[in-house]
């Protein structure tokens, strides 16, 4: 089995958090969420280098993971890491608006795969130069919209495509709480809406939460840290297949991540507050739960390796153009909201 040399840029929790123990030792660990926990589940992956501007973060990473990878080199400059380490795969786990320069450099340095945190970028210009770089250098890139690697979301889409709730008419996404930031966490909901609407967005209108009334027509955040810099917003949009979608992302409402798909003969509900369910004229039933042998970040990494080795199937589960679609929706949202709900048509001009 080939061994893939892995580097991680950015060592905050989503990069380094260890997998949680399950309720019984025989069951192993709970499906990993962090990048490091995902790599730890893939025998072919060896994390050899980590980079962060804060040296205490790389030290914490090494302390947490040296039992798995005893020879991790620490860096504060990703360019130095790329020049020295001959990496096959790199995770980009930095602030939301810092992905582009790093991804372009990784592609040029000869890596074969990139696992990029969401959102892909905070501007279309950045998203486009990232895609140009990976296509120029023949690099595979996946975006960590993590629900795409959770089996229940595929069960839901399979049920929809098989006609379980009839033709889909609407998708309603509700995101609430102080961290209901459009670019930082709203990207998950916007991607989930696109995933289950199963179409291309054509038109959108949006309004900011009152406290963000003067936010402006483009991202002005700090990369995902302070909720005051990344707006709460509601938007309504139309897809090419006639599906209508509502995104309710208020920072001043009860914390919630919940999505409903409304068809002519039923509905499907998914979310973090459970249970996932399907309702038809026959009543309400739990959505069939798939017991997957690989899921989460480990599945994303396995897919990238399979693509590099020519075993993977295209399109990817969460590829660069899926990520760009969400960036386009986010950009359209702030453009419309800054103009008191003026309709924005796709493709969006930045």
Image (cartoon, rainbow, N blue to C red):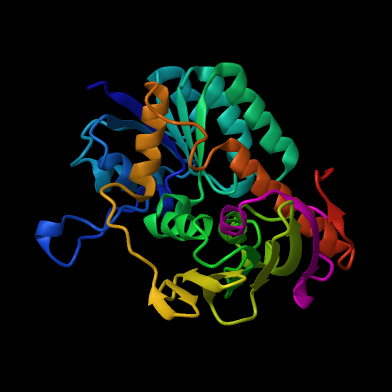
88 sits to left or right of 218: left
Q: Looking at the figure, which quarter contains the N terminus? A: top left
Percent x, y of residue 39? 31, 39
Question: Which residue is at the front of the view, 94 or 21?
Answer: 21
The structure residue drawn at horizontal position 60% and vertical position 22%, both measured from the top left corner, is 135
Say if residue 250 shows up in the picture.
Answer: yes
Please indicate whether residue 149 sits to the left or right of residue 289 in the image.
Answer: right
- Indicate the quadrant containing the C terminus: top left, top right, bottom left or bottom right: top right
Who is closer to the viewer here, 71 or 259?
259
Write the residue at 33% across / 63% down. Answer: 289
For image coordinates 20% across by 60% down, the residue present is 21
Horizontal arrangement in the rendering, residue 95 relative to residue 88 (left or right): right
- Asked whether 201 falls inside the magenta stretch, the response is yes
Q: Does the magenta stretch include residue 320?
A: no
What's the residue at 20%, 34% (across, down)? 70
Residue 57 vertical placement versus 183 (above, below): above
The magenta segment is 192-219
Within the image, what quadrant is residue 173 found in?
A: bottom right
Viewer-proximal residue among 347 and 241:
241
- Can residue 219 be seen in this snapshot? no
Residue 228, compared with residue 116, is above or below; it is below
Image quadrant in which you'd find residue 188: bottom right
Percent x, y of residue 2: 26, 21
Query: Based on the displayed image, in which of its 4 quarters is residue 299 positioned?
Result: top left
Residue 318, horizontal then vertical, whole percent = 51, 42
């Amino acid at each position: 089995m080939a061994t893939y040399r892995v580097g991680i840029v950015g060592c905050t929790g989503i990069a380094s958090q260890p997998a949680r123990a399950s309720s019984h030792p025989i069951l192993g660990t709970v499906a990993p969420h962090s990048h490091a926990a995902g790599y730890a589940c893939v025998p072919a992956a060896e994390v050899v280098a980590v980079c962060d501007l804060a040296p205490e973060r790389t030290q914490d990473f090494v302390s947490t993971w040296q039992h798995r990878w005893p020879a991790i080199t620490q860096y504060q400059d990703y360019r130095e890491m790329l020049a020295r380490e001959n990496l096959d795969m790199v995770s980009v786990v930095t602030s939301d608006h810092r992905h582009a320069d790093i991804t372009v450099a990784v592609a040029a340095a000869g890596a074969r795969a990139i696992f990029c945190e969401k959102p892909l970028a905070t501007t279309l210009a950045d998203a486009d130069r990232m895609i140009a770089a990976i296509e120029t250098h023949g690099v595979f890139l996946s975006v960590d919209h993590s629900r795409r690697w959770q089996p229940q979301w595929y069960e839901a889409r399979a049920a929809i495509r098989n006609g379980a709730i009839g033709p889909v008419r609407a998708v309603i996404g509700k995101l609430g709480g102080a961290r209901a930031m459009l670019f930082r966490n709203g990207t998950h909901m916007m991607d989930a809406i696109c995933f289950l609407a199963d179409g291309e967005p054509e038109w959108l209108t949006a309004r900011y939460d009152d406290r963000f009334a003067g936010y402006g027509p483009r991202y002005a955040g700090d990369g995902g840290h302070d909720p005051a810099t990344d707006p709460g917003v509601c938007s309504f949009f139309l897809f090419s297949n006639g599906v209508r979608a509502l995104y309710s992302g208020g920072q001043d409402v009860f914390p919630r991540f919940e999505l409903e798909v409304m068809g002519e003969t039923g509905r499907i509900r998914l979310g973090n507050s459970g249970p996932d369910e399907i309702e038809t004229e026959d009543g309400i039933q739990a959505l069939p739960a798939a017991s997957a042998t690989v899921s989460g970040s480990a599945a994303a990494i396995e897919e990238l390796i399979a693509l590099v080795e020519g075993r993977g199937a295209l399109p990817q589960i969460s590829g660069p153009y899926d990520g760009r679609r969400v960036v386009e929706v986010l950009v359209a949202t702030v453009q419309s909201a800054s103009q008191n709900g003026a309709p924005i048509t796709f493709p969006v001009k930045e």
